[in-house]
Image (tube, grey):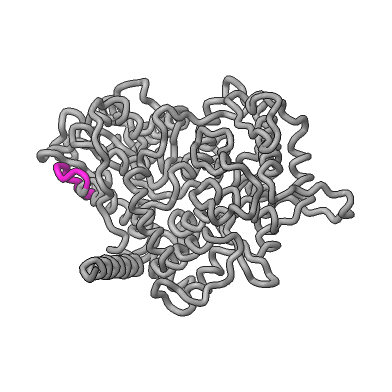
Amino acid sequence: MTYLLQEIRNIYMRSPSYYGFFSQDWVPSVRGWASRLRFEPIRKPAATAPSQQEPVKNPFPILLRRLADTDDGPILSMVWAVHALQSGRAEHAQHMMLHTPVVVTNDPTSEYMVHKWELETLLTVTLNMQKDIVPVFLKMPINTSDFDSFAGVLNLLKDSEDAQSTRLTPENVMSEFHRISHRQFPWQIGWHNVANLYRHAFVYGQGLCDEYFKKTYGLSISDFMACCFVLWVQTQLAPWCAPLTKFPVDVPEDAMEKTMAMVSGELWTTRRKSFELFQTLAAGKDMPVAYHPSYLRLKPIIRAAPRNHYIAPLPELILFRATVGLYYDLFAAGTTVMNDARARFEEYARQLIKAYIPGFDPCPAEEYKYKNSEAETPDILLKRDGKIVAVFECKATKLSFQAQYADDPASEAKNQYDQIANAVFQLWRFFSHVRRGIIKQDLADEVAAVVLTMEPWTQTSSELRATMVAEAEKLAATKEPEMTAEDKRVPLFVSISEMEHMLAHSTEEDVQETFRAGAHDAKYRGWSVREIRRNAVKEVRPSQKYPFEPGDLLPWWKETEERGLAKRAAEVAAQAASELST
């Protein structure tokens, strides 16, 4: 219970700063031509600076050989220990790995810093690597209790990524930023924050989604989240954990067993499923190792059969599974259930805007008649002083693997990106219908057209955004030939997490100026609204507290908080009484 309370307090402490996690000058690196992170040997001075070390020739086969020669259990423990040393949990991993104090850091600029997305890739390659049966004397296993040895393995992975970056050319290098951002940004933002937890509980944890989840998996989404939260806390304290016999939250007796069935897998089953996932998504293509699909996103906990102990080598992925990963459990439910999630996403967005900036009036869509059929305005009509200043079309669709990492996402994930293009068309149709008098709305002089998504569909890619606009043009030519250039406002592609950040630091004027700059200043094409807000609006404002409480949706969260408050109050009272008596 103590650790659970501490983690809840830590999440609240992290929430204001989670929006400002990125350095203003941070730019994602592109393998092969960006600066290369290298580790110095810990006990021996390096002959040259880390960045000047020569890469290994043919590194990938060497990496595979080292992983094949090493048992999976020690590799999982090694990754857990490195992650713990650099995630504020060094006291739990000090005894597991030989290292010097400089290794214990969370400074992203340190040459000893290990990025979590690289750890995930290393685990993915490990699970997909077939183990050979060879004599022990022929093996060259990794010394998993030595940071130097780990650094050498990680540099083999980096060299492998660099070697595969030769496919990049001046013509396609900008599209690489899209893939890099999907690999790195979620890890940098993290999933252990109030906004992520509340948002997904609001969208997926109520109504038809929760009913389907209960019927299909035998527990509520709230109880599933509670068990995942407990597992996240437990798996941060030790690499290999025994099944819990007592629970610090009030959940049904069989809730943990059902949760474990959804988020964990036995080691050899995990290996087989991971390799099957790779084969399915690679589909015979030469997929760069950096973008191999991670089965740990589906099953972040690995069980060892003999003693039924388990490990989460990257514990944060349990929270990913409990929030973002809920989509995996619900997408088979059908249109009715997913439409309910979409409606709740729209409602969440309206409540969010109103909570942060009361001067705005976010109104739901309005129905009207068009050519004897039912038509509808965009999902959110954002008003200020009675006039519409922005319209939002909302999309809660989950990013697929192809949508993130394909060489041509718009083609290989066409059905999903067509939904984004259709959102642009719907925004344009609204402006056309208002101009033509089909529907009467009081528009401000400047009205932003916003595609608001649950996930960052077109981040860091102006080319991908241009493709969506081109597809919308085709729809307009076919379905609404009466549209004019005036109707086709420049669309802004905004993810809900970017929206949260912008609102937390803005007034009504700041939001409108951000939208104006994004629509009319060409230099901001492809930028996120958080960066447009930072660069186009001069005023720097303190971050507002996230306006919603998880306890309003998750009873176990509220109960745990209340018990913690009561415990702390009792401790303060006891301390005061002790001082009075002396």
Identify the image quadrant of residue 291: top right
| Residue 320 shows up from this direction | yes
Q: In which quarter of the image is the N terminus?
A: bottom left
Left or right of residue 342, residue 373 in this image: left
Extreme residue in the bottom direction = 253
Residue placed most toward the observer, 366 or 458: 458
Left or right of residue 579, residue 46 in this image: right
Residue placed most toward the observer, 573 or 421: 573
| Residue 558 shows up from this direction | no
Q: What is the tally of numbered marks visible in this picture?
A: 0
Where residue 333 appears, as percent x and y from the top left, is: 45, 63
Is residue 486 depicted above or below 434 in this figure? above
Where residue 520 appears, as percent x and y from the top left, is: 29, 23
Where residue 207 appears, as percent x and y from the top left, is: 33, 66
Where residue 466 appears, as percent x and y from the top left, is: 43, 28
Is residue 245 depicted above or below 517 in this figure? below
- Range shown magenta: 356-369
Is residue 394 depicted above or below 343 in this figure? above
Q: Is residue 162 magenta?
A: no
Q: Quadrant of the C terminus?
A: bottom left
Q: Residue at (38%, 56%) from the top-left corner? A: 197
Is residue 7 depicted above or below 152 in this figure? below
